[in-house]
Image (spheres, grey):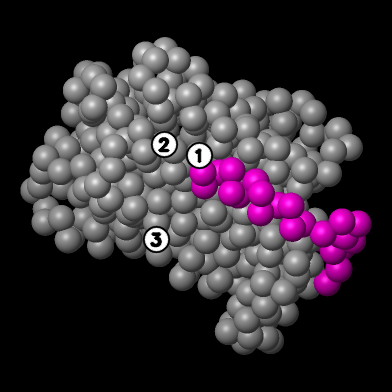
Amino acid sequence: MSAAVPASARYLAASVPTRLATAGSAVALPVLAVQQVGDIAVGGLLVAAGLAPAVIVAPFVGVLLDRSPRPGRLIAAAALLSSLALVAAAFLGALPTAVVVVALAAAGALTPFTMGGLSSIVADTIPDERRAYAHDALSYNIAGVAGPGVVAALLTVVPAQPALFLLAAITLAGGAAAATLAVAPKASSDTRDGVLRRIAAGVRYLVAHRPLAVVTASATLSQVGAGALPIAAVGLALARTGSSESGAWIVTAFAIGALIGSLASAVFARLAVPPHQVMLAGYLVTGLATLPVVPDWGIGVSLATVVVSGFGSAPATAAMLLLRKQHSPASVRSQVFTVGAGLRSTAAAAGVGIAGVIAVAPETLFLMIGACWVTSALTLLAFPRNVARFDTVD
């Protein structure tokens, strides 16, 4: 990719497609399961399989990215393997469910590269850290809109299988763009340290540094609700319209709100509002705005309130990413980002699993989802006052 292309455009070209596929598959897989095997619980299992392994692999991914002179190439390789897993998943029914679960779990082990891994290098790619993390949040939210949106549009004319083939191709395109990202290795990286020692240092810092621990706990808990959302949306659509496919539009409405919120975050990134307060307010809005979905006031009201819910999540995500950077020394920053992203992925898998197996009405699931986000907001009340930044400490 030409050096004349703005850094933000190069970063978005790499991050949006790879994250789009993850967001889209969370909608496509439950619908695929309903179409191919007639069981939404299998869909929950497939989505969970793609999310759960991330936290186990994330520390190793962080060390690899810290030490690599071309982290973009590692991200590209991860995207290639993930695309193959999506192709395998498309053959659910022809392939045993266990084989598809294993393929998706392998892809899930690679998601720290495209989630936290890309986030860990964004500030080295885009000047101005607030602008960088606003663009990173924008990337997540563009992907969050386009993934479910593309799937929802395709499902109106074709089954879920072609949608997964398209997501695989989009993943490949993102990987090709990621290979062009040249980021200098961190000056603090020391390859003489053993991998396990580096991992231990990163995890110890993540747990012991109170501001980062509070932010990580809040962000992780929020993803239990986020993970349950696609399953709850499909269940609500089945209950109210008799069509599982229309559940994709509910998820798309949330993502549209998040995209609008991320654009607002990018515009107002320079406002002198403490990021932990932005994160708290965003999660609170997200949780409370899910409540009007519970009464059956019509699909229009449900979609509108879910848009508001998504809007609140975007500035919270941008603030979370900025806080990770501000409160982690360069020597462990990639691990902080990849482990944090891995925890969020695993929490989302837990949300998917809970939503898929508990026998409650979809309206009750939406109440539980809202409670997760509100609790995430309240967790940030424990963020210490007048805390110093450590993002310049090695």
Q: Amino acid at mark 2?
A: Phe
Residue at 46% over, 56% down? 347
What residue appears at the point 28 percent right and 43 percent down from the top-left corner?
360
Q: Measuring 35% from the left and 33% from the top, which residue is drawn there?
A: 363
Across and down, in percent, residue 236 comes to 30, 29
Q: Amino acid at mark 1?
A: Gly
* Dot placed on the residue nearer the N-terminal end, 3 or 2: 3
Label 2: how many Cα within 10 Å (few below 14, some 14–19, many 20+): many
Q: Which residue is mark 1?
A: 370
- Name the quadrant containing residue 90: top left
Horizontal and vertical percent position of residue 353: 32, 54
Q: Secondary structure at mark 1?
A: helix
Above or below for 201 versus 124:
below
- Dot 3 or dot 1: first in sequence order is 3
Q: Which residue is mark 2?
A: 366
Q: Nearer the viewer, residue 80 or 34?
A: 34
Q: Residues within 10 Å of mark 3 (few under 14, many from 20)?
A: many
Residue mark closest to the camera, 3 vs 2 = 2
Q: CA distance from mark 3 to mark 2?
A: 22 Å
> Badge 3 is on which residue?
52
Start and end of the magenta stretch? 371-394
Q: Position of residue 45 (x, y in %)?
A: 26, 53
Which type of secondary structure does the marked residue at label 2 adopt?
Answer: helix
